[in-house]
Image: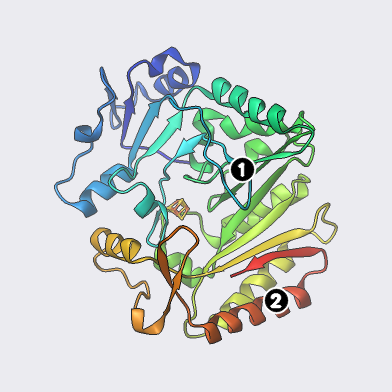
Amino acid sequence: MFVPKRIIFEKDALNYSISNQILDQFKDKSEIELIYLNSNKYKHHIPGDNLPKQYIEGKKTLIVGKKKSLKFQTCKPSAHYQLPLVSGCMGQCEYCYLNTKLGDKPFTKIYVNLSEILKQANKYIVERSPDITIFEGAATSDPIPVEPYTNALQKTIEAFGANENARFRFVTKYNDIDSLLQLEHNDHTEIRFSINTSFIISQYEGYTASLNKRIEASVKVAKAGYPTGFLIAPVFIYENWEKEYHDLLIQLKQKLPDDLKHPLTFEIISHRYTTIAKNRILQVFPESKLPMEEDDRKFKYGQFGYGKYVYPKENIDKIKDFFSKEIEKIFVNKEIKYII
Ligand code: SF4
């Protein structure tokens, strides 16, 4: 659960019940600064005279405000639309794509006009009906750490569970999922856990849940009958990588029940970076040990017009071969969605 250092309420946010619940929860806690804005200009309330400090302070900041534009972004190929419940995340993963996406705004923002957001989602569902519409709830955030403040996932899972044409999916590196276990999801929500070896988590994934906690949470959601999956990303090639990823898969197998209602899904993504991301990461984490040497990588043009540095083909082939064989061998009821 995210415990912020400061909470900034945007103008008019307190017209919504979620904001008032947050205020009630924190108004007597003197260690947490509460800021009420008359305009929606918040940047000067987040201290820090250089990027690393602004990043750290931003990550400790919760903004409570309204989602103004209700035109949802598309989210191909995994879903039809992003569902804007939250943006940003308390985690401090060095390689996180939010470092470039959110730039100097690394704070978490909760959208309090949830009923308007769900109403808009319903419009998209009706437009596409009778086809199914899939929404992604973690395109610009990890929604779990702020769920206790908003119950946004809970309300979404219930609303989409009751709608034949709606599907929902999100991914998390956290474990605070108990409030979701008893919901009537009707198999319409897929919960995925982003996992990695303990070595990679301890090196690069600051302020996230430990591997054991993520696995425990995945066992609970699988037992609650949710379609459950694992995103193993980013995969790094390092000393002992094969043994450590093998042990990770074995640990999953040992802890998950055998009688799963749905096949376990796997999405595997090898590490890659853009020049913009590398520059940003090194500004925010000057001591970062993330392997980002162009000489060890191959430049590949991406579908969005910018290129990325990926592992050379022989290493990508090794990753594909390793994960497809291991998953095939270890799991019975499973589906590998992709390995890239
Ligand atoms: Fe980014 Fe996910 Fe880490 Fe949050 S938990 S910082 S969204 S990679």
Determine the image quadrant of residue 151: top right
* Element type at mark 1: loop
Is residue 105 toward the left or the right of residue 240 in the image?
left
Tell me where residue 114 appears, x and y as whole percent.
54, 24
Question: Closest to the observer: 47 or 128?
Answer: 128
Name the residue: 26% across, 44% down: 57
Kind of residue sitting beneath label 2: Ser
Q: Is residue 335 above or below residue 180?
A: below
Numbered disc total: 2
Determine the image quadrant of residue 107: top left
Question: Closest to the observer: 115 or 204?
Answer: 115
Q: Quadrant of the C terminus?
A: bottom right
Q: Is residue 109 visible?
A: yes
Q: Is residue 221 above or below residue 146?
A: below
Name the residue: 43% across, 12% down: 15
Residue to which mark 1 is pinned: 177
Mark 1 vs 2, N-terminal side: 1
Kind of residue sitting beneath label 1: Ile
